[in-house]
Amino acid sequence: MKRKIIALGKRTAVTTLPSAWLREKELKAGDFLELEEHGNWISLSLTENRKESLKEENIQELEEMTNRYMGALYKAGYDKIILKVKKKQIPIIQATLERTCIGLEIIKTTDTEVHIHRIAHLEDIDVENLIKRMFFTLQSTAQDFLLALYSNKKEDFLSVIKKDDQTNRLADTVRRYLNKEQKDPLNYALAEQLENIGDWYKNKAKEKKHLLSQEKLKKINEMIELLYDLYFAFSLEKLEHFGKHAKEIKKSIHGEESLESLFTMLFDVHGIILTKRV
């Protein structure tokens, strides 16, 4: 939505805030907002007067999707969660919190209820540092999977599967922060896509037979490093180099459905980065 800048004296300008948003957040004249500058745009967020968000829900009908629902609650940014559950759902919820939901903890359980509170704040998170860690983890995962293909040892594939938890934790933390503290749809989309790419390696590591071309996968893995360079040190020269590398790979893997799927996910990342950096 557009807002007009209004002159207030010779050196001061003000603008208006949506009245519906002010009512929803219970803000009034005299309250403070946190303002951050981001190049061509600014963000406003609530400070200490922010109310903790509460979610109460009966999830007893969930079975297969209990962990997915917990992940959604975390990414949505809730501070307090009270769930009506079946007893057998409690260990699933606990495992999900420990695996991916940084900053949330169960503080009370009964046979029919779970109370979850935020015990760590995310206000000071550096999103780009988390994305950098996601790239590093993904590079490591891709390299480990390639080495597992060479060794064909079960323990090497298990290492790849386990490493995906770290990618998920980082992605979920980024998305929770962006939902709660600031809106940045491009970084949100980037975190989701990097998580999806990590899932590709995890799911392939779980397969009993691995018939992938190691040399072709090695070339695809190199796209991760090129995308990292595009994000953190963007230039037209690097963009062109990425495009030529991708064109060469696409031609070499034509008809290999599994590798084409990974290639497409990685290639789509450059569109997010390009939109953010131009």
Image (spheres, rainbow, N blue to C red):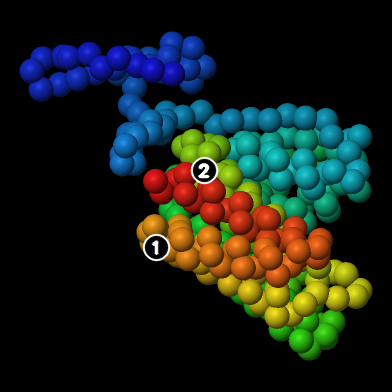
* Residue sitting farthest toward the top: 19
Tell me the residue at 8%/18% (across/down).
Answer: 10
Above or below, 260 relative to 145:
above
The amino acid pointed to by label 2 is Leu
The label shown at residue 262 is none
- Left or right: residue 241 compared with residue 166: left
**Which quadrant would the N terminus be assigned to in this image?**
top left
Tell me the residue at 71%/83% (across/down).
Answer: 147
Front residue of 115 and 145: 145
Q: Position of residue 64 (x, y in %)?
A: 89, 46
Query: Which quadrant holds residue 199?
Result: bottom right
Label 2: element kind: helix
- Left or right: residue 16 compared with residue 226: left
Tell me the residue at 83%/85% (across/down).
Answer: 152
Above or below, 228 relative to 55:
below
The amino acid pointed to by label 1 is Glu
Front residue of 250 and 1: 250
Tell me the residue at 78%/88% (across/down).
Answer: 151
Label 1: element kind: helix
Above or below, 99 relative to 138:
above
The residue at which mark 2 appears reads as: 186
* Label 2 crowd (10 A; few <14 / some 14-19 / many >=20): some
Q: Would residue 35 be visible to someone looking at this image?
A: yes
Q: Where is residue 70 in the image (x, y as percent from the top left)?
A: 74, 43
Front residue of 104 and 163: 163
The residue at which mark 1 appears reads as: 237
* Label 1 crowd (10 A; few <14 / some 14-19 / many >=20): few
Q: Where is residue 22 in the image (x, y as percent from the top left)?
A: 44, 16
Q: Given this view, does label 1 or label 2 mark the residue nearer the observer?
A: 1
Q: Where is residue 182 in the image (x, y as percent from the top left)?
A: 46, 37
Q: How far apart are the alpha carbons under marks 1 and 2?
A: 22 Å
Q: Would residue 146 be visible to someone looking at this image?
A: no
